[in-house]
Image (cartoon, rainbow, N blue to C red):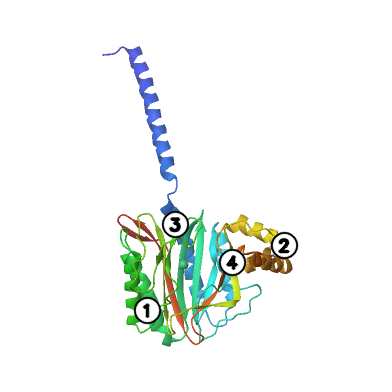
Amino acid sequence: MASKKEETKQKAKEKEAKEEVVEEAEEEAEEEKEETPLDKYKKAGEVASKIREHLKEMVKPGVKALDLCETADKMIAEAGMKPAFPLNVSVNNHCAHYTSPWEDELVLKKSDVVKIDVGVQYEGFIADTALTVAFNDVHNDLIKASREATETAVKVIRAGGYTGKIGDLIENIIEGYGFTTIKDLSGHLLLPYRVHGPKTIPNVSGRKGNLILQDEAYAIETFASTGSGESHSDRTKLYIVRLAEGRFPLRTDAAKQVRRLIDKEYHRLPVATRWIYKELGVAKAKMGIRELVQAGALYQYHVLADKSDAYVSQHEHTVYLTPEGPIKTT
Ligand code: CO
């Protein structure tokens, strides 16, 4: 047995050791607190879903598309996040890439089929989610078709599988309702600060597609159309752009300012021309964008539409692939 003095020494040593253990535990907790990519995808997803549900309630005949877009912008900023792309408001035959231009007067009508597509990013980790609202019951099946296709795809996607199999399923469901899918639009791999990664989830059958890997995130979006399923781009409607990769010599100060603004705030993500108008003023923004387009320095997202009398529905969710299966983040 140790003497009293020895005991005190021993106790002090033990105390030291204990403190070390506590410190180590604290350090470990600190490490644990560090956010994983999945945590970040979830954070962005929470905000995107909240905005989607808020806008779903806001979409009514008489509402301006611009009010929807500005509400999304505001809610993203209030959440301390950034847009992954501008809110898409696609009415009737429009499939994608319509966001309100500067001073947009577009007002929703009772006969409209309205798609809203929300993109939020948190430190580059993206949530991409969409739904469709109509005010006339004749469109119920159209809406059900894309909702069911997306919800089914979100449940069955697995690491180790091929995206083509999901395309078979999607087309089967949508054609089962008597509609066509929009063939050249697809779900897409999400990468940090990149909405469209190099892998896609087709909306048509018969493709092999890409191998799905664990820890990847995908936006699964399906479309049902009463039209042909062929979407064409309307070259007169350019409301969303992004910086192209590469170096492009620019002449005017306006063009340089536009490029600097996009680069600083949005990296290589899609931006609304109205954001640039708002920041730099109409004249400068217009001039700068025109030169950037001419120089090939901007990738252009023209509005995509099926034939003019068609109605299109869309639903979209983001999923993250764990070894145990998919986690829907939106
Ligand atoms: Co998407």
Label 3 and label 1: CA atoms lie apart by 27 Å
Which residue is painted at 51% across and 84% down in the image? 112
Badge 3 or badge 2: first in the primary sequence: 3
Gap in angstroms between the C-alphas marked 4 and 3: 24 Å
The answer to which quarter of the image holds residue 269 is: bottom right
Give the CA distance from mark 1 to mark 4: 30 Å
Q: Which amino acid does label 4 sit on?
A: Val
The 10 Å Cα crowd at callout 1, few under 14, some 14 to 19, many 20 or more, is many
Mark toward the viewer: 1 or 4:
4
Q: Is mark 2 on a helix, strand or loop?
A: helix
CB under 8 Å between discs 1 and 4: no
Which comes before the other along the chain, label 4 or label 2?
A: 4
The residue tagged 1 is 145
Q: In this view, does 159 lie above or below 99?
A: above
Specify which label sits upstream in the sequence, 4 or 3: 3
Q: How crowded is mark 3: few (under 14 residues within 10 Å), some or many (20 or more)?
A: many
Q: What residue is shown with label 2?
A: 254
**In the image as oriented, which residue stretches furthest toward the left?**
1
- Say which residue label 3 marks: 41
Quarter of the view holding residue 24 = top left
- Residue 78 is situated, as x and y percent measured from the top left of the image, at 57, 60
Mark 4 lies on a secondary structure that is strand
- Residue at the spot of label 4: 241
